[in-house]
Amino acid sequence: MLAAFISHPDCARHEMGPHHPECPERLGAITDHLLIKGLLDYMIPYDAPLATEEQLGRAHSSLYVREIFEASPAEGYHHVDPDTNMNPHTLQAARRAAGAAVHAVDLVIAGKASTAFCNVRPPGHHAEHDAAMGFCFFNNAAVGIRHALDVHGLQRVALIDFDVHHGNGSEDIFKGDERVLMCSIFEKGLYPFNGEEAKGPNMVNVGLPSRSGGDKFREAVVREWLPALEAFKPQLVVISAGFDAHREDDMGNLGLVEADYEWVTRELVSLAARHSHGRVVSCLEGGYVLSPLARSVAAHVKVLIGAD
Protein backbone atom coordinates (compact mmCIF):
# COMPACT_ATOMS: atom_id res chain seq x y z
CA MET A 1 0.00 0.00 0.00
CA LEU A 2 1.34 3.42 -0.97
CA ALA A 3 1.68 6.35 1.40
CA ALA A 4 -0.23 9.61 0.92
CA PHE A 5 1.37 12.95 0.05
CA ILE A 6 -1.09 15.72 0.85
CA SER A 7 -0.59 19.34 -0.16
CA HIS A 8 -2.28 22.18 -2.04
CA PRO A 9 -1.15 25.22 -4.09
CA ASP A 10 -3.13 27.49 -1.74
CA CYS A 11 -0.57 26.76 0.99
CA ALA A 12 2.10 28.58 -1.02
CA ARG A 13 -0.05 31.70 -1.46
CA HIS A 14 0.11 32.57 2.22
CA GLU A 15 3.07 34.80 3.04
CA MET A 16 3.84 37.15 5.92
CA GLY A 17 6.10 39.73 4.34
CA PRO A 18 9.59 39.97 2.82
CA HIS A 19 12.34 37.95 4.50
CA HIS A 20 9.95 36.17 6.86
CA PRO A 21 11.47 32.75 7.67
CA GLU A 22 8.16 30.90 7.29
CA CYS A 23 8.14 31.43 3.53
CA PRO A 24 6.23 29.83 0.64
CA GLU A 25 9.43 28.43 -0.85
CA ARG A 26 9.59 25.85 1.93
CA LEU A 27 6.97 23.66 0.26
CA GLY A 28 8.52 23.76 -3.18
CA ALA A 29 11.94 22.88 -1.80
CA ILE A 30 10.47 19.81 -0.12
CA THR A 31 8.47 18.66 -3.14
CA ASP A 32 11.37 19.16 -5.54
CA HIS A 33 13.77 17.21 -3.35
CA LEU A 34 11.35 14.33 -2.84
CA LEU A 35 10.83 14.23 -6.61
CA ILE A 36 14.55 14.23 -7.34
CA LYS A 37 15.10 11.42 -4.82
CA GLY A 38 12.34 9.36 -6.40
CA LEU A 39 10.36 9.18 -3.15
CA LEU A 40 7.17 10.61 -4.62
CA ASP A 41 7.02 7.53 -6.85
CA TYR A 42 5.96 5.62 -3.73
CA MET A 43 3.28 8.09 -2.66
CA ILE A 44 -0.19 8.97 -3.90
CA PRO A 45 -0.74 12.74 -4.21
CA TYR A 46 -3.89 14.23 -2.71
CA ASP A 47 -5.18 17.79 -2.64
CA ALA A 48 -5.77 19.08 0.87
CA PRO A 49 -9.44 19.94 1.39
CA LEU A 50 -10.64 23.01 3.27
CA ALA A 51 -11.21 22.25 6.94
CA THR A 52 -14.74 23.16 7.97
CA GLU A 53 -15.61 25.38 10.92
CA GLU A 54 -16.97 22.28 12.65
CA GLN A 55 -13.68 20.43 12.21
CA LEU A 56 -11.65 23.42 13.40
CA GLY A 57 -14.00 23.85 16.34
CA ARG A 58 -13.04 20.45 17.75
CA ALA A 59 -9.58 21.85 18.59
CA HIS A 60 -10.35 25.57 18.94
CA SER A 61 -13.13 27.63 20.46
CA SER A 62 -15.87 28.52 18.01
CA LEU A 63 -15.37 32.19 18.90
CA TYR A 64 -11.68 32.01 18.00
CA VAL A 65 -12.39 30.24 14.70
CA ARG A 66 -14.90 32.93 13.80
CA GLU A 67 -12.42 35.67 14.75
CA ILE A 68 -9.78 34.24 12.39
CA PHE A 69 -12.31 33.92 9.57
CA GLU A 70 -13.37 37.54 10.04
CA ALA A 71 -9.79 38.84 10.37
CA SER A 72 -8.85 37.81 6.82
CA PRO A 73 -7.81 41.01 5.04
CA ALA A 74 -8.96 42.00 1.56
CA GLU A 75 -5.47 43.37 0.89
CA GLY A 76 -2.23 43.91 2.73
CA TYR A 77 -1.54 42.26 6.08
CA HIS A 78 -3.42 41.78 9.30
CA HIS A 79 -1.02 41.37 12.25
CA VAL A 80 -2.18 38.65 14.63
CA ASP A 81 0.93 38.88 16.79
CA PRO A 82 4.40 40.41 16.24
CA ASP A 83 5.62 37.56 14.00
CA THR A 84 2.33 36.13 12.71
CA ASN A 85 0.52 37.93 9.88
CA MET A 86 -2.43 37.21 7.60
CA ASN A 87 -2.49 38.15 3.94
CA PRO A 88 -5.59 37.76 1.73
CA HIS A 89 -4.72 34.08 1.10
CA THR A 90 -3.83 33.05 4.64
CA LEU A 91 -7.27 31.84 5.67
CA GLN A 92 -7.50 29.49 2.69
CA ALA A 93 -3.99 28.19 3.33
CA ALA A 94 -4.65 27.64 7.03
CA ARG A 95 -7.88 25.80 6.27
CA ARG A 96 -6.05 23.62 3.71
CA ALA A 97 -3.29 22.84 6.22
CA ALA A 98 -5.78 21.72 8.86
CA GLY A 99 -7.89 19.96 6.23
CA ALA A 100 -4.84 17.99 5.14
CA ALA A 101 -4.53 16.51 8.64
CA VAL A 102 -8.21 15.57 8.64
CA HIS A 103 -7.93 13.95 5.21
CA ALA A 104 -4.76 12.11 6.23
CA VAL A 105 -6.55 10.65 9.25
CA ASP A 106 -9.44 9.55 7.05
CA LEU A 107 -7.10 7.86 4.58
CA VAL A 108 -5.03 5.89 7.08
CA ILE A 109 -7.98 4.82 9.20
CA ALA A 110 -9.88 3.68 6.09
CA GLY A 111 -6.84 1.68 4.99
CA LYS A 112 -6.45 3.70 1.79
CA ALA A 113 -2.92 4.75 2.72
CA SER A 114 -0.32 3.16 4.96
CA THR A 115 1.03 6.48 6.21
CA ALA A 116 0.60 10.12 5.22
CA PHE A 117 2.83 13.19 5.03
CA CYS A 118 1.14 16.60 4.93
CA ASN A 119 3.37 19.07 3.06
CA VAL A 120 1.44 22.12 4.19
CA ARG A 121 1.78 25.55 5.71
CA PRO A 122 1.13 27.57 7.79
CA PRO A 123 2.36 25.30 10.57
CA GLY A 124 0.16 24.68 13.58
CA HIS A 125 1.70 23.48 16.83
CA HIS A 126 1.90 26.92 18.50
CA ALA A 127 -1.80 27.66 17.86
CA GLU A 128 -3.64 27.35 21.18
CA HIS A 129 -7.31 26.66 21.84
CA ASP A 130 -8.16 30.33 21.39
CA ALA A 131 -4.99 32.07 20.20
CA ALA A 132 -2.79 32.29 17.11
CA MET A 133 0.96 32.69 17.62
CA GLY A 134 4.37 31.61 16.40
CA PHE A 135 3.50 31.58 12.66
CA CYS A 136 0.46 29.34 13.44
CA PHE A 137 -3.28 29.97 13.06
CA PHE A 138 -5.01 26.59 13.40
CA ASN A 139 -3.38 23.62 15.10
CA ASN A 140 -3.30 21.19 12.19
CA ALA A 141 -2.23 18.11 14.13
CA ALA A 142 -4.75 18.81 16.89
CA VAL A 143 -7.59 19.21 14.39
CA GLY A 144 -6.65 15.86 12.84
CA ILE A 145 -6.40 14.14 16.21
CA ARG A 146 -9.75 15.41 17.43
CA HIS A 147 -11.25 14.19 14.14
CA ALA A 148 -9.79 10.75 14.81
CA LEU A 149 -11.17 10.72 18.34
CA ASP A 150 -14.57 12.35 17.89
CA VAL A 151 -15.52 11.20 14.39
CA HIS A 152 -13.72 7.86 14.01
CA GLY A 153 -14.09 6.91 17.65
CA LEU A 154 -10.44 6.13 18.43
CA GLN A 155 -9.65 6.02 22.13
CA ARG A 156 -5.86 6.52 22.19
CA VAL A 157 -3.82 8.78 19.89
CA ALA A 158 -0.15 9.65 20.37
CA LEU A 159 1.10 13.10 19.34
CA ILE A 160 4.86 13.29 18.78
CA ASP A 161 6.54 16.69 18.42
CA PHE A 162 10.27 16.92 17.62
CA ASP A 163 10.31 20.55 16.47
CA VAL A 164 13.10 22.58 18.11
CA HIS A 165 10.36 24.70 19.73
CA HIS A 166 7.88 23.23 22.21
CA GLY A 167 4.37 22.73 20.84
CA ASN A 168 2.68 24.90 23.44
CA GLY A 169 -0.53 25.09 21.41
CA SER A 170 -0.90 21.33 21.27
CA GLU A 171 -0.22 21.10 24.99
CA ASP A 172 -2.83 23.79 25.67
CA ILE A 173 -5.45 21.91 23.62
CA PHE A 174 -4.75 18.41 24.94
CA LYS A 175 -3.69 18.97 28.55
CA GLY A 176 -5.67 16.57 30.72
CA ASP A 177 -7.21 14.72 27.74
CA GLU A 178 -6.43 11.12 28.66
CA ARG A 179 -7.19 9.99 25.12
CA VAL A 180 -4.02 11.75 23.91
CA LEU A 181 -0.41 11.17 24.95
CA MET A 182 1.79 14.04 23.81
CA CYS A 183 5.57 13.54 23.67
CA SER A 184 7.67 16.64 22.98
CA ILE A 185 11.42 17.21 22.78
CA PHE A 186 12.60 20.79 22.34
CA GLU A 187 15.51 23.11 23.05
CA LYS A 188 15.42 24.84 26.42
CA GLY A 189 15.26 28.62 26.48
CA LEU A 190 13.66 29.06 23.07
CA TYR A 191 10.28 30.42 22.06
CA PRO A 192 7.61 29.90 23.43
CA PHE A 193 9.69 29.75 26.63
CA ASN A 194 7.69 27.01 28.31
CA GLY A 195 7.19 23.25 28.26
CA GLU A 196 9.62 22.17 30.95
CA GLU A 197 6.76 21.92 33.46
CA ALA A 198 4.09 19.73 31.90
CA LYS A 199 0.53 21.01 32.14
CA GLY A 200 -1.03 17.56 32.46
CA PRO A 201 -0.25 13.93 33.29
CA ASN A 202 -0.63 13.03 29.61
CA MET A 203 2.39 15.15 28.63
CA VAL A 204 5.96 13.84 28.28
CA ASN A 205 7.98 17.01 27.78
CA VAL A 206 11.76 16.89 27.48
CA GLY A 207 13.71 20.13 27.28
CA LEU A 208 17.29 19.65 26.06
CA PRO A 209 20.15 22.11 26.49
CA SER A 210 21.57 23.93 23.49
CA ARG A 211 24.09 21.91 21.46
CA SER A 212 22.85 18.59 22.87
CA GLY A 213 23.28 16.85 19.52
CA GLY A 214 21.84 13.64 18.19
CA ASP A 215 23.12 11.34 20.93
CA LYS A 216 21.32 13.24 23.71
CA PHE A 217 18.21 13.50 21.55
CA ARG A 218 18.16 9.75 20.96
CA GLU A 219 18.81 9.02 24.64
CA ALA A 220 15.83 11.20 25.60
CA VAL A 221 13.55 9.41 23.11
CA VAL A 222 14.58 5.99 24.45
CA ARG A 223 14.44 7.01 28.11
CA GLU A 224 11.35 9.26 28.18
CA TRP A 225 9.19 8.71 25.10
CA LEU A 226 9.30 5.04 24.23
CA PRO A 227 8.32 3.56 27.64
CA ALA A 228 5.36 5.95 27.88
CA LEU A 229 4.28 5.21 24.31
CA GLU A 230 4.54 1.44 24.78
CA ALA A 231 2.38 1.65 27.91
CA PHE A 232 -0.14 3.88 26.13
CA LYS A 233 -0.52 1.59 23.08
CA PRO A 234 -1.73 4.26 20.64
CA GLN A 235 -4.23 3.40 17.93
CA LEU A 236 -2.81 6.19 15.74
CA VAL A 237 0.50 8.07 15.75
CA VAL A 238 0.45 11.72 14.67
CA ILE A 239 3.71 13.61 14.24
CA SER A 240 4.24 17.36 14.44
CA ALA A 241 7.28 17.16 12.22
CA GLY A 242 9.48 20.20 12.68
CA PHE A 243 12.99 20.09 11.25
CA ASP A 244 14.42 23.31 12.71
CA ALA A 245 16.56 21.41 15.23
CA HIS A 246 18.91 20.64 12.30
CA ARG A 247 22.42 21.93 12.84
CA GLU A 248 22.22 24.07 9.68
CA ASP A 249 19.01 25.83 10.77
CA ASP A 250 19.64 29.01 12.74
CA MET A 251 16.21 28.94 14.43
CA GLY A 252 17.71 26.71 17.12
CA ASN A 253 20.90 25.08 18.22
CA LEU A 254 20.22 21.45 19.11
CA GLY A 255 22.49 20.17 16.34
CA LEU A 256 20.48 17.33 14.82
CA VAL A 257 21.17 15.90 11.35
CA GLU A 258 19.20 13.91 8.79
CA ALA A 259 20.21 10.60 10.38
CA ASP A 260 18.55 11.65 13.64
CA TYR A 261 15.24 12.33 11.92
CA GLU A 262 15.50 9.04 10.08
CA TRP A 263 16.20 7.21 13.36
CA VAL A 264 13.32 8.75 15.34
CA THR A 265 10.92 8.15 12.45
CA ARG A 266 11.97 4.50 12.35
CA GLU A 267 11.25 4.19 16.08
CA LEU A 268 7.80 5.72 15.63
CA VAL A 269 6.95 3.59 12.59
CA SER A 270 7.99 0.50 14.55
CA LEU A 271 5.76 1.58 17.44
CA ALA A 272 2.87 2.10 15.04
CA ALA A 273 3.41 -1.35 13.53
CA ARG A 274 3.02 -2.89 17.00
CA HIS A 275 0.04 -0.92 18.23
CA SER A 276 -1.57 1.19 15.49
CA HIS A 277 -1.86 -1.09 12.46
CA GLY A 278 1.03 0.95 11.05
CA ARG A 279 -1.04 4.14 10.95
CA VAL A 280 1.11 7.28 11.02
CA VAL A 281 0.14 10.83 10.02
CA SER A 282 2.91 13.44 9.80
CA CYS A 283 2.29 17.19 9.53
CA LEU A 284 5.03 19.66 8.62
CA GLU A 285 5.86 22.20 11.30
CA GLY A 286 9.18 24.11 11.40
CA GLY A 287 12.35 24.04 9.32
CA TYR A 288 13.41 27.31 7.73
CA VAL A 289 16.67 26.83 5.85
CA LEU A 290 15.59 25.22 2.60
CA SER A 291 18.35 22.70 1.90
CA PRO A 292 18.49 21.02 5.34
CA LEU A 293 14.70 21.19 5.53
CA ALA A 294 14.30 19.32 2.23
CA ARG A 295 16.98 16.77 3.10
CA SER A 296 15.51 16.14 6.55
CA VAL A 297 12.00 15.68 5.21
CA ALA A 298 13.36 13.20 2.67
CA ALA A 299 15.01 11.20 5.46
CA HIS A 300 11.71 11.24 7.37
CA VAL A 301 9.54 10.34 4.38
CA LYS A 302 11.89 7.57 3.27
CA VAL A 303 11.07 5.72 6.48
CA LEU A 304 7.34 6.54 6.33
CA ILE A 305 7.07 4.90 2.90
CA GLY A 306 9.20 1.91 3.87
CA ALA A 307 12.07 2.73 1.53
CA ASP A 308 14.77 2.97 4.20
Image (spheres, rainbow, N blue to C red):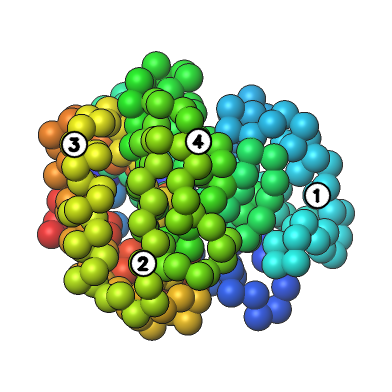
Q: Mark 1 falls on what kind of element?
A: loop
Q: Secondary structure at mark 2?
A: strand
Residue at the (38%, 83%) spot, across then down: 248
- The reply to whether discs 2 and 1 touch (Cβ–Cβ < 8 Å) is no
Say which label, 3 or 2, has the lower sequence index.
2
Which of the two discs, 3 and 4, labels the residue nearer the N terminus? Answer: 4
User: Left or right of 90: which side holds 252?
Assistant: left
The Cα atoms of the two marked residues, 1 and 4, are separated by 29 Å
- Residue 211: x, y in percent? 34, 80
Q: CA distance from mark 2 to mark 1?
A: 37 Å
Q: Provide the residue designation for mark 2.
A: 208
Residue density around tag 2, few if under 14, some if 14–19, many if 20 or more, within 10 Å:
some
Q: Which residue is mark 1?
A: 72
Q: Residue at x 46, y 75 (%)?
A: 252
Determine the residue positioned at 37% across, 72% down: 209
Q: Earlier in the sequence, mark 2 or mark 1?
A: 1
Q: Nearer the viewer, mark 3 or mark 2?
A: 2
Q: Would you call the spot at circle 4 few (<14 residues within 10 Å), some (14-19), or many (20 or more)?
A: some
Q: What is the CA distance from the residue labelled 4 to the residue labelled 2?
A: 21 Å
Amino acid under disc 4: Lys
Rate crowding at label 3 as few (under 14), some (14 to 19) or many (20 or more) other CA atoms within 10 Å.
few
Q: Could you tell which of marks 3 and 1 lies nearer the N-terminus? A: 1
The amino acid type found where label 1 is placed reads Ser
Q: Which residue is mark 3?
A: 230
Q: Residue at point 35% right, 31% down?
A: 157
Residue 302: % across, % down: 21, 59
